[in-house]
Every structure is written in structure tokens, then in C-alpha cells.
Image (spheres, rainbow, N blue to C red):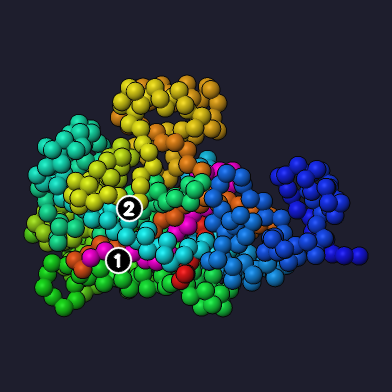
Amino acid sequence: MAKVYLFRVRRPAADWEKSGKFRIFGNNVLLPTHFLTNIQHMTGGSPFEQYPLRPGFWDEMISDGSVRPEYRHTFDTLRQLSAEDLHQKDKLAAELFMSQGITFTVYSEDKGIERIFPFDILPRIIRGSEWDLIETGIRQRLQALNLFLSDIYGEQQILKDGVIPAELIASCPQYTRQVHGIRPAHDIHVHIAGIDLIRDADGKYYVLEDNLRTPSGVSYMLENREVTKRLFPDLLSANRVRMVGNYPLLLHQNLLSLATRQIAHPVVVLMTPGVFNSAYYEHTFLARSMGIPLVEGRDLVVDNHKVYMKTTQGLRQVDVIYRRIDDEFLDPLVFKPDSILGVPGLMSAYRKGNVVLVNAVGNGVADDKAVYAYVPDMIRYYLNEEPIISNVPTYQLSDPDAFRHVFDNIGSMVVKKTDQSGGYGMLMGNKTTEEEVIAYRKQVEADPRNFIAQPIIKLSTVPCFLDGRWQPRHVDLRPFALCGPDGIRIVPGGLTRVALREGSLVVNSSQGGGSKDTWIVED
């Protein structure tokens, strides 16, 4: 008896039965192996046999029934593995993450629960030519954002010229008046950035969000690569995947280059809020990888406008603080007086230029979701260039016309709070009830400045190995950039975040999303 394969089809059964070669079972068609020509990449006795593409979405691996060139070698390797082989690799990946203690806190539970970071074994693969365009676009965007921050805490010329409404900045809760007039070392405000990108149904990239304060996730990018090396040791070299493992070295070099004291060995520390922070694993990972001290606020002291670290040999002056603490907790003498995480007097040392804070204080004004809408205008204003990567169209709900348009078309909109992140505080118009819309609308009416809306973008999908088979799941991408005196360097890859729940567009790890290794391969 000839070997056959069962496929789910979206064409009428009659179309398949005309030739008399096929047997129809409900929505499935039974195909003999000698017919598998155009769809030969979807066979091989593996869980790939019934990979169900989602109509209307850009799939990163499959196009017009064929495997995209960048995926072909990896696909041909994986399709030869049985479901049991893949289960074993999936299990090994979980064990590796468990042994390394790679965790993240899921706040959507009743209580914050520490979980192993979910990881999918199939990498997300991007062609080198596509990546080069992404890299150029991110570099352009960060140049404009740095100029904006220097301007907004200085002469504010962009407001005087009417490019951005002054009331938008005045009402921004992240605009930090305490640092107006402070010029950071080398005039760099954004030293480390994580720019969130999405891809729509046509395969076009958009910037979804700028993370310019304390962006997280780079340790998961690095650990994903290490786990992939263990699972598929030959695939990376065979695909000529660009390297990400040197990120800690590049980060350390960047931090050292920011020091203002003319000494051979500047002192750099990583400042963490402590073990209860959701990203504490990343803090320890990066400090260990760079070989620098991991400190908390109580380990530092300010004397004569200089910051010192307490050591067993006495006080040691600190030049650069890579801080993973939000602005309002940095110095109880300037911000929250009840903060026990910061260092009294830290801002006086910062103002005097005796210590460099990475990232600079006050960056939140540039990644406020309402200000985000004006980044393309910033690029035109400061660089006299057109944006290389577009924004997602954004509606300011303080505008009555925009407000009416959004709620008249709420089924195709997502409404977000401008001061929230991690996927919290959103209203997904296509997955909500009328009662929820009414309640949320009242929140918006009470404080329209604190809300923006965007059309729901059909995020691209990638195959994920779930429940013993390959299933499409939606993804975004967070590349990481380092800005220093020598320019902007972007690690070739980044963190691909995956919405693990079927049909979900929320990829955030803090709400139970997962991640993939991200490969940039030569064309």
C-alpha cells in the first residue's frame, strides 16, 4: 500500500476530488506520496506534516506553500526528527534553563510567581539583508532620540518650533524636571536601548515601542543562543549565523568608555533593586559576564559629590553605574523620600559629572507612548531624513476627533495607557465585551492624555513546538543597541518574544510569553 499523508485544506473538497486521485475526510485531504511535489517541504514523517498556517498573517518560515530560503537548511534538518526526538530536545532545553535558574516573574497570577523562562527550540531566522535595514533604521532612530533628550532638557527648541506640542511634554509624568540643564557625559542619554519591532501581514517592519530607561531581556537572548548550541551544535555554523555572544564584552567596553576620570581602570558597577526584582536573574548574569560588582543602594555612599563603593579594603570611587533601578528610586533626597533602594546624594554627584548613570535620568519622556507618535517628526527635524522604519499609526485620545474614531472602530483597535508596559493596562478591542469597553472608555474620558490607541497589527507568526506538533504563534523582536562615544553598535539578533497562547498577540514575558533564539544568517 502506498504511503499517504493527511493534510488540512482550505479549498472546497470538490476541487480536490475532480481528478479522482484523492480521498476527502471532512476538511482533510489524503494525498499519495507520488503527488507531493509543490508541498514536498511539508512532509517527512515529522510533526511538520500538518503545520497549520494562519490565513492573513505573514509566516516567517512559509511563503506560498514553500519554505523561505533562510529557513530551508534548518527545516530540512528538523523535518527528519520524529516527535519523540523533538520532545527530548524540548525537555533538554527546559532542564538547561532550570539548571541555570533562568527565571522571570509572571505578574498576571494572583501572586508574583517565579517561573522558568519559556523557550521554543526552533530559532526565528532573519536574512542578513533584512537585518542590515533594521540596523540602519534603529541607528537613525536612536540618533534622533538622543538629540531630542538633549534638546528637551536644554533649549527645548523642538517645542519652540512647534514640532511637538509643549503641553504634551508638560503633562508627561516621565518628564524629569530635576535633571533640566544637566548634560550627561559625552552628551549621550541613551546608552542601552531595546527597540521593539513587529512585522505586519505584508511582512513590513514597524517600531512598536522604544525602551530607553532600563530595557531588559538581553540575558535571555544570550542564554537562548547557548541552549540552541547544545540542542543543534552543527546548525549554527552550517547556517553562518552571526554572533551575539560577545555582547557582555561590548557592553563592558561601552561602559568603560563613558567614564570621565582619566584613569587606566575606571570602576563600573551594576546597581540592582535586589533579589525580589523580576529581572534579578539578568542583573546577576550581566554582572558576572562582565566581571563587575553587583551592588545595591546600601553598598554605595556619596561623599563630597562623589560616589564610593564599600569594600573590605575601604571606600572605592565609582565612575559608572549601570543602574537597573527606576528614576524615582535613585535618590531619596531628590525623588521618593521613602526609597530604600537608592543612594542619598547620588543626584548631586551626577549633576557635578563625577559619576555616569546608564541610562541617563529622565529618558522616560522619550519612550512615553504619547511622545512615541512624534519620533518620525523628530527624525525629520533633527536629521533631515525620512524614517527608515515606520511607527505604528497612533491616535492621541486627548484629541476629540481621534477619540471618536477609535471608539467607533474599537473592534480593530488596541488602547494603551501611556505609563504602562509589559502588556498591562491594554484594551484589545477584538477580544473584549461591550461592558469592558464601556468601563474602559470611562477611564479614558477621565484622563485622555494618559491613553493612546493603535490599529491591531496582525503580528507575523513562526512555528513553535507545542503539544507535540508545530503550531504558529505570534512574535515580536527586541534588538539591543549600545550607544557610546564611538557610535552605536547593535547586536545582530535580539530577543524574539512569542505569544504562547493560541491566537494571542501579547508576547510579554511578564504575562507568560516565551522566547526563541534569533538567527541573522547571510543571504
Structural distance between the alpha carbons of marks 2 and 1: 17 Å
Quarter assignment of residue 238 = bottom right
Find the residue positioned furthest to the right.
1
Residues at marks 2 and 1 touching, judged by CB atoms closer than 8 Å? no
Q: Amino acid at mark 1?
A: Arg
Residue 350 circle label: none
Q: Quickly name the residue at label 2.
A: 388
Seen at 60% across and 62% down, the residue is: 67
Residue 379 percent coordinates (x, y): 24, 49
Label 2 crowding class (10 Å Cα cut-off): few <14, some 14-19, many 20+? some
Mark 2 or 1: in front is 2
Asked which secondary structure carries label 1, the reply is: strand
User: Looking at this view, is 393 or 477 the one in front?
Assistant: 393
Q: Earlier in the sequence, mark 2 or mark 1?
A: 2
Seen at 20% across and 52% down, the residue is: 383
Residue 461 percent coordinates (x, y): 55, 51
Residue 115 percent coordinates (x, y): 53, 55
Does residue 347 belong to the magenta stretch? no
**For the stretch drawn in magenta, what is the main secondary structure?**
loop
Q: Is residue 318 visible?
A: no
Seen at 80% across and 57% down, the residue is: 31
Report whether 305 appears left or right of 282: left
The boundaries of the magenta stretch are 487-507
Q: Is residue 381 above or below residue 465?
A: above
Does residue 503 belong to the magenta stretch? yes
